[in-house]
């Protein structure tokens, strides 16, 4: 009987150890942080996957916490494909046909491509935009308006890294995806005619 009691006590020790709270002052880093994207077209919430895309989520959250995304616009919207933002602000310009020009935001570093993390470019997923160079992503992100599996990696090439998904407000994203677009330097036929502005991105506690 004493032996059985001793074994039970030992079996409980690991679980008790895991139940201990982190030391005071230790920052808590959620495995799946959530952010609310507040725009002049409505709001939506993104859940980030830190486990599958730690480098991308860390970079994105730094931009969020620094207020980098406040004032950026959706500069590329292709119906049935993607809605992309995170790299340009809008500047009033009376000489422009539509009254504004797009100003690129300054960024400091690139993020290692994590497209091989097992997350797929399915409708509602959020990916990290880049140029043709695989590790050229900086601050821009896109939301898949449809299943875009061609953006996934293949054995012969890099893909585009998914690092989260829209969990609330996909109807807002769909509305953005159906807004009229026009030619606007430097993008052909994909810039919303009426600017869609991200007022802020805030962490959801």
Image (spheres, rainbow, N blue to C red):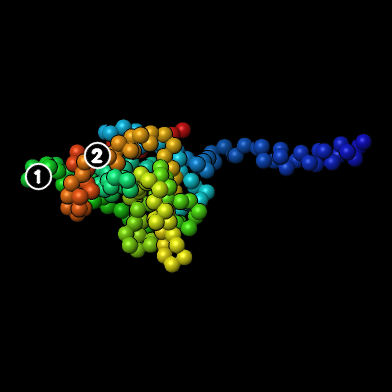
Mark 1 and mark 2: span between their CA atoms? 18 Å
Q: Secondary structure at mark 1?
A: loop
Label of residue 179 in the image: 2
Residue at point 75% right, 40% down? 13
The x, y position of residue 50, in whole percent, is: 49, 47
Closer-to-camera residue (156/28): 156
Contact (Cβ within 8 Å) of mark 1 with mark 2: no
Dot 1 alpha-carbon crowd within 10 angstroms: few under 14, some 14 to 19, many 20 or more:
few
Q: Tell me how many marks there are.
A: 2
Outermost residue to the left:
95
Mark sitting earlier along the chain (1/2): 1
- Decide if residue 194 is in sight here: yes
Q: Quadrant of the N terminus?
A: top right
Would you say 132 lies left or right of 61 here? left
Residue at point 34% right, 38% down? 173
Closer-to-camera residue (111/159): 159
Residue at point 31% right, 53% down? 107
The x, y position of residue 119, in whole percent, is: 48, 51
Q: Residue 21 occupies which quadrant of the picture? A: top right
Dot 2 alpha-carbon crowd within 10 angstroms: few under 14, some 14 to 19, many 20 or more:
some
Label of residue 138 in the image: none
Outermost residue to the bottom:
156
The x, y position of residue 145, in whole percent, is: 35, 44
Q: Secondary structure at mark 2?
A: loop
Label of residue 97 in the image: 1
Closer-to-camera residue (195/138): 195
- Decide if residue 60 is in sight here: no
Residue at point 37% right, 42% down? 64
Mark 1 or 2, which is nearer the eye? 2
The x, y position of residue 70, in whole percent, is: 29, 40
Would you say 171 lies left or right of 10 here? left
């Amino acid at each position: 009987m004493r032996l059985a009691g001793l074994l039970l006590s030992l079996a409980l020790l690991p679980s008790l150890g895991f139940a201990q709270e982190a030391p005071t002052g230790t920052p808590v880093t959620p495995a799946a942080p959530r952010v609310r994207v507040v725009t002049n077209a409505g709001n939506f919430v993104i859940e980030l996957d830190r486990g599958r895309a730690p480098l991308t989520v860390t970079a994105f959250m730094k931009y969020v916490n620094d207020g980098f995304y406040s004032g950026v616009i959706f500069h590329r919207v292709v119906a049935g494909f993607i809605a992309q933002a995170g790299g340009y602000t809008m500047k009033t310009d009376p000489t422009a046909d539509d009254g504004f020009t797009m100003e690129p935001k300054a960024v400091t570093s690139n993020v290692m491509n994590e497209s091989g993390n097992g997350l797929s470019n399915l409708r509602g997923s959020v990916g990290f935009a880049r140029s043709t160079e695989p590790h050229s992503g900086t601050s821009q992100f896109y939301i898949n308006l449809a299943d875009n599996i061609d953006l996934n990696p293949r054995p012969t090439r890099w893909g585009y890294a998914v690092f989260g998904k829209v969990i609330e407000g996909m109807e807002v994203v769909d509305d953005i995806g159906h807004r009229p677009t026009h030619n606007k330097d430097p993008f052909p036929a994909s810039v919303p005619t009426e600017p869609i502005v991200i007022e802020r991105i805030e962490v959801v506690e």
